[in-house]
Image: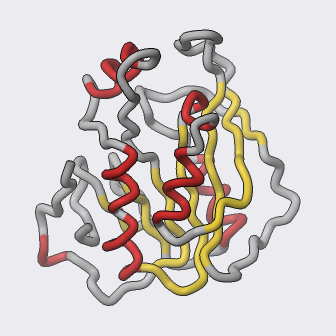
Amino acid sequence: MKFASQHLGRIKMNKKYQIVYGDPPWKFEKGLWERQNSRASSHYPTMSLTEICNLGIPLRTYLEENCHLYLWIPSQQLGNGWGKIVYEAWGFTLKNIITWKKPQIGIGYYFRNTTEHLLFGVRGSLRTLDRKQSTDVTANRERHSQKPDIFRQLIVKCSGDLPRIELFARQKVEGWDCWGNEVESDIEL
């Protein structure tokens, strides 16, 4: 899966980021989660674990030595260690998990999902600014896979008003550079 930039003139080759935020289009493996995979892939192209890990190589050219990474991961992928694998492949150390509690009941195989998880990790030694932020956030569900804006606000509050990029972006947001197949990308991976 290649998410290509459509406007190479806008590529910010020399810019370095200290905050990376993303919602990878996880491809669920065949078998138990095949039903969920068909739901995600009907909305957008999905990527395998290997494809997501491989993005770390070109991504590193855009990162400062000290930076934070926030990545969404579905509940059912926590147990198989995919988050830790991606963090290591991208050169980060996984440090914590923020849980999004949705008041609405979702789909599920064994249990009805009402949570998603935002993994937090560090490259180098960048500290968080707001040490009072709890690891649970309640916010309403949006359209399929869309994350509430409150999480971008939380990221800036905790990590600072630093150069930042959203990967796998579905829309352009003021104050954020972006990369994805549904937006005009600011970098090329």
Q: Check the image and report above or below for 44 versus 69.
A: above
The answer to whether residue 68 is left or right of residue 35 is: right
Residue 124 x %, y %: 64, 81
Q: Check the image and report above or below for 128 versus 34.
A: below
Q: Check the image and report above or below for 83 versus 5.
A: above
Q: Note whether residue 101 is visible.
A: yes
Residue occupying the point 24% across, 37% down: 45
Residue 27 x %, y %: 36, 34
Residue occupying the point 63% across, 65% down: 156
Where is residue 158, by image quadrant?
Answer: bottom right
Where is residue 8, by image quadrant?
Answer: bottom left
**Applied colour scheme:** secondary structure
Residue 142 x %, y %: 49, 29
Residue occupying the point 62% across, 56% down: 153
Q: Check the image and report above or below for 60 versus 22.
A: below
| Quadrant in the picture for the C terminus | bottom left
Q: Nearer the viewer, residue 174 or 138?
A: 138
Query: In the displayed image of the protein, which residue is found farthest to the bottom?
Result: 14
